[in-house]
Image (cartoon, coloured by chain):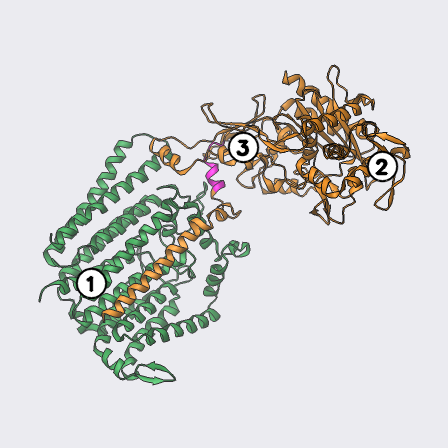
Chain colours: A orange, B green
Amino acid sequence: MNQPIARLFMVTIVLFGALAVMTSWWTVVRADELNAATQNTREVLRGLKVRRGLIRDADGGVIARSVREENGVYSRRYPQGAIFGHPVGYSRASVGQTELERFRNEPLIGKKDSITTVFDQLTGKQADGQDVITHLDPEAQKQAIDAIARAGKSGSVVAMDPQTGAVQVMASVPGYDPNTVVDQKSFSALATDEARKPLVNRALQFGEAPGSTMKVVTAAAAIDSGEYDLDSQVDGKNNAVISGVPLKNNFNESFGSIDLVGALAKSVNTVFARVAEDLGKETMRKYMRRFGFEQKPQLDYPEDAMSASGEYRNGKLIPVTSRFVDVGRMGIGQDKLSVTTMQMAQVAAAIANEGTLMKPRLTDRIVDRDGRTAEKIEPEVQSKVVSKESAAAVRTMMEAVVERGTLTAAQIPGVQVAGKTGTAETQLGDTINDVWFIAFAPSRDPRVAIAVNVQDVPGFGGEIAAPIAKDVMTTLLRKGN
Amino acid sequence: MSARTRELFALIPAALLVTAGFLAVFLSQDALSGVGGQNDLGDLSLTYGGIFLGLCVVVHLVLRARLGQADPYLFPLVAVLACFGLVMIYRIDDELARQQAQWFVIGLGLFTATIVGLRDYRVLERYRYLIAISGILLLILPRAFAPENGAYLSIRLGSLSVQPAEFAKIAIVIFLASYLRDTRQVLVLGARRFLFITLPPLKHFGPVLAIWGAAMLLLFFIQDIGSSIMFYGGFLAILYVATNRLSFPVIGLTLFGAGSWLLYQVRPTIENRVMAWRDPFDPDLYDKVGGSYQLANSLYAQADGGVLGQGFGQALLETPDGAAVLPAPQTDFVYAVIVNELGLAGGVALLLVYLLVVQRGFKIAMLARDSFSKLLAAGLTSVFALQVFVIIGGVTKLIPLTGVTLPFVSYGGSSIMANFILLALLLLVSDRARRSV
């Protein structure tokens, strides 16, 4: 009878082994997936008992702080109200976390590795959230929000330091006050407001056609590829046939042979459409990808809450090399382009920073409760877009736009500004446009690069978007001193 | 070194474990509530460890006097399990832990009583039909009381809740071991081959089928699926050991498959369990009453633990409002809490301790010299191993979840008392087997 007993023991070993395998399956293989599941409330519930860290603006002002309620649970307050609804977001037990609150959740709740946790327990140290210090400038942010609201119903502004990628302004209108998002009901009210879409961060989601600001990208590709230089003459006659269809210039103005500097200053559509066609889809795609197109921004922000900029067909991103792309019209910011304000700010920043694109970032550093810096987010290069010389040439063209194009609305006294306007027609008719302006200043030692987008307004980029950019840049440059 | 001296030394790690465990729980509760005075608590955990060690030494002395030759490792292993369970339950609810400690004292009392009162366990054979019938009566009993959670699992005596199935399993194993000792030869020799399948002769197999069938039928009516699996598995294990015919358990498992399928068709509670088992994360099932919330949260709790766990006292069991995040943490889902707090490492360590208990049990069966002892030890050990498998398998989604206790670890008086009796019987068999004739 001993043989069957021994076999029974073997069976037991196999069965218990299966139990160990299943335990490993849940604790190791599928752990990350389960921990992140929305049904799993552990992370949020645990966060309630921790004093979540502060989020501060660049001036040291408090954007978000946690207050202990009577029942020992912490809740979040946003002293600056709607100003930083985007891009800071909110953190609530009932509706979760969004935007920067979500991306920086781990330091904010003081999550550390398990060894540190054990050590803290032994020394009786309480788990405590760390503070997140951002680059966001409250004055310029408020100015941007107010200016968009005055100019139109919706739009966004992104301003950053081109040399470091530090995002100083990220304004999206209409916004919301995160103090009002307290439960599922108040959240639904905002989330279902289809007319205003206040929870959408327009700087990062649902791009628009960038209009003529895209010509900066085409110009950079033209010069850096070696096919063109500043003096290259291109035929700028009206109604040139691009992809089989005649293309109009603004006000149907016809130009003869014109150099690229003049063509950008006068924003001649036919010139840049010809250039883009001549360069071809491969070359255009190569440079667009270096600028950050066709991918999500490398921003410290939840990836699923950002859109990639590029050509879209039936709601899906398609490569520039696709046969559905009209490369000529794409080169002047039309076709099926959908581009975020963040992406256009990066275009300005890359040219400003001598052709090198820095990774954008909202966070400057993470600080523990005692004020010690726990983590400094250092500037990082995202890509080398064009050579120093090519960047200088494009800069010259953009300076000419502001000076020779007599774009007085963008001129700052005593500071040289380089920029480009854009006006994209909407489906609402010929007079209602999406207007753009991208710029950087001072153009020879840039401290700020900016993109402004205002939607559905009767007017042009130079009239509506440029003054907003000028005001915000003036504020940032003054404070930067 | 004699067996008993080895046993005494083996108890020391158990006592250290209970001390360290209580210390860790006290420290973490201390850290959470933010009060000082850790020295007092340190003393208190030493006291708990001391009391536990004292009890174990008393039982050890009884063993030394009565069962000098019995297996020296079984009792310390169970002590490790018991103190581990006590610490976990203390961490969940200190009032429950106090009750559990009382159950341990009663359990150890029953253990001692069994050892002292049943010097020659072979007298059990004489009363096998009496034992079998009382086992079945125990299973009928809950039917007379109101059901709890849709199943007739327990009977209430005042504030106490007794689960008779825990005791019935021992009674049925004793009956099967005793009956099969007599008839195992005939079962093998009288077997007929029918359609390439070897079938035992009905004349001798009948009583087994009757007793065991009655038990299964009752379990079907009291809707205790977990216990049915234990009974069935234990039956097949004893039958296999008695006959050494692989075809018997194979036929048994086939019948079990068919039976389960039939049951699945007629019983909605079982269908719910199986649906929840197949996709516990399905949002509809998750929110449904009697759906997959429990199982899904058991898995979330384990994922939360990871490799090394969140630490003693760190598992999140309820919301600030007091609503349960992980239901029944002290009974059905105690393993999920253990993995949450001690991680994969803690879970596997616990499994290893159980495996060692099972190994000692089967070793006792192999050393035993007479058939009844062999069958009894093998049967009791199989039922014990199956109980561990059924509940941990359910909690880790290896098999559909059915509620049975985790022996010596889960909260519950019946489980502790019954398993201490089971342990006493194993040690009685062991002592007899190891004595030189």
Residue A377 makes an appearance in the image: yes
Labels 3, 2: one chain: yes
Which portion, as a residue range, is magenta?
A43-52
**Tag 1, which chain?**
B
Residue that extends furthest to the left in the rendered view of this protein: B437
**Tag 2, which chain?**
A
- Identified at 14% across, 62% down, the residue is B431
Q: Nearer the viewer, mark 2 or mark 1?
A: 2
Instruction: For label 2, count other residues whose C-alpha is less than 10 Å away and answer few (under 14), some (14-19) or many (20+).
Output: many
Write down the residue under mark 1. B425
Q: Is residue B305 left or right of residue A93?
A: left
Write down the residue under mark 2. A270
At label 1, the amino acid type is Leu
At label 2, the amino acid type is Thr
- Identified at 77% across, 20% down, the residue is A411
Marks 2/1: CA distance? 97 Å
Secondary structure of residue under mark 1: helix
Labels 3, 1: one chain: no
Write down the residue under mark 3. A76
Closer-to-camera residue (A200/A222) = A222
Where does the N terminus of chain A fall, quadrant-wise?
Answer: bottom left
Residue B154 makes an appearance in the image: no
- Identified at 28% across, 53% down, the residue is B353
A423 to B215, vertically: above or below? above
A162 to A19, vertically: above or below? above
Marks 3/1: CA distance? 60 Å
